Amino acid sequence: MTTPVGRRERKKAATRQALADAALNLFIKHGYDAVTLHDVSEAADVSTTTLLKHFPSKEALVFDEEADQEAGLVAAVRDRTPGTTIPQALCTHVKRVRLRAADSDVRYTQFLDLVRNTPALSDYAHRMWTRHQDALARAIAADTGAPPDDPRSAALAHFALETSALAHRAADPEQAVDIAFDLLDNGWNAPDRHSEAGHS
């Protein structure tokens, strides 16, 4: 049985959503750097003090998915279909949650453009995404029966998360993610020209 959400919790959630919506509207219309916290609180009809109770920084107003992101990454490993490797499952997940602009609505496309074109936001988004590395590494280790501090699991988690930044710098983001995860899944197998030269 689901516990009913109290009036106070509903009011807090509504205030938080109003602040996030007001911030995104203002940032898209005027540019992130031109908008102050006071502007956002005025638009949402709350005090700046109230705003800061919900969002600890200006960047945080744009992002409200941290818990969902971590849960999604862990689930991608834990709930993958039989026969799917961990890199394959993470590749599918990264493409779905980080590169979904092509089939998204106009609002989400505007959000992505804002983040990509605002260094403070793109840096914050990358930090927020990669801070899930430890949780992802633990999920990989648990799935493979390795110790929680297994360095191989940590390395896979690190490079899996970094594929997102690589993709956003690539001409073909989806192809870049596929190539990166293929490398993580199958290892480096290109011919070593220096080694061949030594044996000729």
Image (spheres, grey):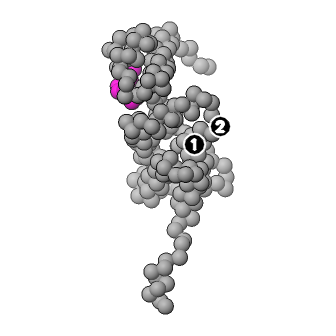
Q: Residue at x 49, y 79 (%)?
A: 193
The x, y position of residue 139, in whole percent, is 50, 47
Q: Are the residues tagged 2 and 1 within 8 Å (C-beta)?
A: no
For the point 37% across and 25% down, the residue is 34
The residue positioned farthest toward the right in the image shown: 82
Q: Nearer the viewer, residue 138 or 178?
A: 178
Residue drawn at x 54%, y 72% as measured from the top left = 190
Q: Taking the image as drawn, is residue 118 in sight?
A: yes
105 relative position to 37: left or right: right
Residue at (32, 14) in percent of width and height: 49
**Quadrant in which the N terminus is drawn:** top right
Magenta stretch encompasses residue 59: yes
Q: Position of residue 120 (x, y in %)?
A: 37, 36
Find residue 2 and report its image quarter: top right
- Residue type pointed to by label 1: Leu
Residue placed under numbered mark 2 in the picture: 103
Identify the residue position indicated by label 1 in the image. Answer: 99
Residue 87 placed where, x, y %? 56, 55
- Tell me the element at label 1: loop
Q: Which residues are magenta?
A: 54-60
Crowding near pointer 2: few (<14 within 10 Å), some, many (20+)? few
State the mark number for residue 159.
none
Which x, y percent locates residue 7?
Answer: 50, 8
- Mark 1, Cα crowd under 10 Å, few <14 / some 14-19 / many 20+, is some
Number of marks in picture: 2
Residue kind at label 2, given as amino acid type:
Asp
Secondary structure under badge 2? helix
Placement of 105 over or under 126, stated as above or below: above
Q: Identify whether 5 is placed above or below 57.
A: above
